[in-house]
Image (spheres, coloured by chain):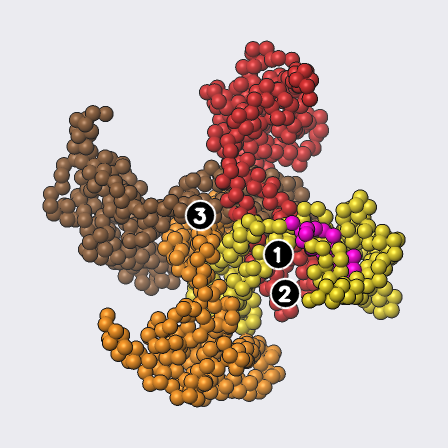
Chain colours: A red, B yellow, C brown, D orange
Amino acid sequence: MTPEFKYRKHKFDEGEPLSPWREKIHEVIFEADTFAGKTFDVALIITIFLSVLAVMLDSVQVISVQYGSMLFAAEWAFTILFTIEYILRLISVRKPMLYAKSFYGVVDLLSILPTYLTLIIVDAKYFLVIRILRVLRIFRIFKLANYMGEASMMMNALRNSRAKISVFLYTVLMSVVVFGSLVYVIEGPENGFSSIPKSVYWAIVTLTTVGYGDISPQTPVGQFLASCIMILGYGLIAVPTGIYSAEITREAMKKKDVTNNACPSCAYEGHDKDAEFCKKCGAKL
Amino acid sequence: MTPEFKYRKHKFDEGEPLSPWREKIHEVIFEADTFAGKTFDVALIITIFLSVLAVMLDSVQVISVQYGSMLFAAEWAFTILFTIEYILRLISVRKPMLYAKSFYGVVDLLSILPTYLTLIIVDAKYFLVIRILRVLRIFRIFKLANYMGEASMMMNALRNSRAKISVFLYTVLMSVVVFGSLVYVIEGPENGFSSIPKSVYWAIVTLTTVGYGDISPQTPVGQFLASCIMILGYGLIAVPTGIYSAEITREAMKKKDVTNNACPSCAYEGHDKDAEFCKKCGAKL
Amino acid sequence: MTPEFKYRKHKFDEGEPLSPWREKIHEVIFEADTFAGKTFDVALIITIFLSVLAVMLDSVQVISVQYGSMLFAAEWAFTILFTIEYILRLISVRKPMLYAKSFYGVVDLLSILPTYLTLIIVDAKYFLVIRILRVLRIFRIFKLANYMGEASMMMNALRNSRAKISVFLYTVLMSVVVFGSLVYVIEGPENGFSSIPKSVYWAIVTLTTVGYGDISPQTPVGQFLASCIMILGYGLIAVPTGIYSAEITREAMKKKDVTNNACPSCAYEGHDKDAEFCKKCGAKL
Amino acid sequence: MTPEFKYRKHKFDEGEPLSPWREKIHEVIFEADTFAGKTFDVALIITIFLSVLAVMLDSVQVISVQYGSMLFAAEWAFTILFTIEYILRLISVRKPMLYAKSFYGVVDLLSILPTYLTLIIVDAKYFLVIRILRVLRIFRIFKLANYMGEASMMMNALRNSRAKISVFLYTVLMSVVVFGSLVYVIEGPENGFSSIPKSVYWAIVTLTTVGYGDISPQTPVGQFLASCIMILGYGLIAVPTGIYSAEITREAMKKKDVTNNACPSCAYEGHDKDAEFCKKCGAKL
């Protein structure tokens, strides 16, 4: 790659340079280094918490009946606030489409859309539950000092042990299918094991040591088989734990710092401390 | 061992050399290096998943009544496909008997046999459940790149900690026998603890922290004993986890690569990268 | 800071030097090096255990009816003993207010206050439960030889992995909110999932593998979702365990000794072996 | 210590030297190096398993009614066999009293006593359950090759982390007392939380993630508190696991071999490979 090509590429990636006031908005909304940026983050988290709480309380019959109009007003207040925030985010990045199609961009949109849709669709009770996804927005909390590095280290450890965890998960799934079918034959529909899928569900409930007790084996042979599944599940838990422990110990040794600033062009986060260009779109940081 | 003896041994082990078209079939079915091999593996996994799904859905009354004939047709389609595959496997290895008697050979046969038996035996409802063992065939998924080494490393760690895990398992089994008997004396048949085996079953349910709640202690002394078992079980989980963590950390340090090609003679898998001869039958790889 | 200032500061911090008999009381009550100190600690622990047992038994109807007056007498005996101890503690430290406002100072006061309040307030049944906080006083047991260093090492490991555990906890909380809302939509009030908060409660019961079974999914889709939550919870347990294992291994390498003597001025405990001045109030140890 | 004193001490400790035939019995019964010793061990384990099975089956009403006389005969056969074995053990050690008062000596006696007592005491149904302690005798299995070292390493790891585990256990116990009392106040007797001890029992069931569901919180506040206990319990499991993992990793590095021969004088087991004298009684090995 020639220097010239690189130069052109960066120019292309950076899009139009932001005007000073959009630069300022970007700093407040996307970054956490300045006082204004930190204050905005904390205020946002509190607002999100309150809006999620409102959605949850709205689903409780006694509260909904008594404080219905208050919750309705609060909901519209939150929606308008989040809409303004969404528009500001679109304005303050150089490539709005890249942000709009990113994970957080979609979550931000899903947080406000359902409320507006109630104006069109009449019976949207269950539809409104989508607003609960607002809770995902709080993951931005990890942008705040200290958490970024830890979270990315934990994710790295998970990513590195992905293959081992897949092997483990498949073994678990296969075991519950075989054990579930076996218990279906032994106990049969008369003891609540009415089909193989339901028996597999029971096997999962047992192997993971949850144990609802809504279905439980009644025959001695079924109880013996259940005992085997329980002890297997009790011992098997050692496998993912062992894998992850080994991985996180290794990760802990080579942990490196990550900044918590977003790219001014595409809003991608998680750049290394010594990075000078965005690793997603190549814009200058 | 003289070179001559080695030579003769290998000649004996390799059996008849495969003709080119059988060689080609072997490559597609048993190996995962070529494009055809990978495609075959993926197609097989999807087919197995669908056939297992069909067996599971068939056991659900409402589905079985409505879509019975469709599931019946699908079942025969899967069975014929798997039969062709089984025959091709027999043809393309140099020693068909060795394959037929191996673990996967038996599973492959059990996957097709029950359907044919329904032609002879009339009421074979529960018998058909054997087909669920098809799910075991998917373990071949680990032949696909990356998984082989991880899986064998996890198995090694389990094998190395076998002695420790036996000691742990025996301690658990002994504890549930002693605690189960004790609770049988304390609670007695009037509270659901009708016999020692049933009380031992309850002790397993409690120690492994499953806790169905189908039987639970009613007297204060019984509840105190149950509390002790729970805390024991809660703490004891640390033992297998500690053992396995230590082992997998050690394994991780000396992990070595394993190829995912099967022996052309006996279909044994899991050879080291530098292996030149099959470690099971001595045939040249 | 000039030496003079330091001198004055210490003089200020140390308050009035204790008279010999108060010095003696301090040694017995706050320290565990002498025979008298150890004896006092053991006697105190036994008394606390008995007093907690009395509070617990008092809540059992059948015992309360039969042995009510005995338990009433015991309660007053314990209260008077603890009151004397509390006064002695106040007398034998140089800065009584610092002790009174410390964690243990508050717990010590809460241990005796409720009983006196019953003389004023008539119906104080539930109020008396506060006395159960006496159990917290036993944490002073860790002052006894050997436990101090271990406990502080375990706390250090927790403190160092605080950021990682926060990330983990938030992920868990967010998962249960999303999954709870989802199951609320799928199962609905007719299957016991009457509101989002209740569904989130169910999701916590399931994810942590507790599994009461008071609410459990009835529809196939709900049971499938429940299976996913269970397997997630079963695997997720590996995360805090891995974090803490890695941390405690690191801690174990750099463990340093801590003395079990309290500061003669403010009663703060947990000073390093080589400490010459209290790190809380600057008094000479 | 002068050599002379050592000499006299050993002479005293070794007691009377065993005559050749008692020496031979000792070798067969207490050691596992010779063929006869191994055969005896395996035969003993099988006999113990069968006798425990007989005790368990005897408690099942339907089996007891039908095969009562057969089980009665088997029980006496086992008792007589174990009595002979017990006498042989007494004969073949130099200090019978030391063996009789050891842990295994007491277990061996408790395995045979109850059956003889049924000749004197008429209604000894529950008394017979003591025979289940025979299961403890199988711990001798660990004398068999390989297991000894592993078991002692696991025990060492437990012993070394004793202080940490005590701190952890006390924290757990204190938490359940405080949480149990709190839930007793919140939920009250009308929701099944009839007394503090019962509420503490519920808190243990919840914290250890057992979750019977026989008692479960009904009020929103109670369910919120329960959620906190569950998440605490879910995370707290990391503590003993972390402690034990760190310890077993350290143990694994310095593991040393232990022989599986018993001392000819006092039957103490677990001597180091290079030990020449018994570390319990000083007799020559």
Question: Could you tell me how far apart the alpha carbons at marks 1 and 3 are, in whole angstroms?
Answer: 25 Å
Q: Which residue is drawn at 50% across and 48% down?
A: C241
Q: Are marks 1 and 3 on the same chain?
A: no
Q: Does the magenta stretch include residue C136?
A: no
Q: Where is residue D127 in the image (x, y as percent from the top left)?
A: 45, 79
Q: Which residue is drawn at 43% across and 69% down?
A: D273
First to last magenta residue range: B257-274
Residue type marked 2: Leu
Question: Could you tell me how far apart the alpha carbons at marks 1 and 2 are, in whole angstroms?
Answer: 24 Å
Q: In this view, does B155 lie above or below A273?
A: below
Q: Which residue is drawn at 60% across and 84% down?
A: D67
Question: Residue A55 vs residue D150: left or right?
Answer: right
Label 2 environment density (alpha carbons within 10 Å; few <14, some 14–19, many ≥20): some
Q: Which element carries disc 2, helix, strand or loop?
A: helix
Q: Which element carries disc 1, helix, strand or loop?
A: helix
Q: Observer-nearest residue: A157 or C101?
A: A157
Residue type marked 1: Met
| Quarter assignment of residue A103 | top right
**Pointer 2 chain:** A
**Pointer 3 chain:** C
Q: Position of residue B251 (x, y in %)?
A: 56, 52
What main secondary structure does the magenta stretch of the protein show?
A: loop
- The residue to which callout 3 is attached is C249
- The residue to which callout 2 is attached is A225
Residue C16 appearing in the image: yes
| Quarter assignment of residue D54 | bottom right
- The residue to which callout 1 is attached is B155
Q: Which element carries disc 3, helix, strand or loop?
A: helix
Q: Position of residue A166 (x, y in %)?
A: 65, 48
Question: Residue C35 vs residue C68: left or right?
Answer: left
Q: Is residue C55 above or below residue C250?
A: below
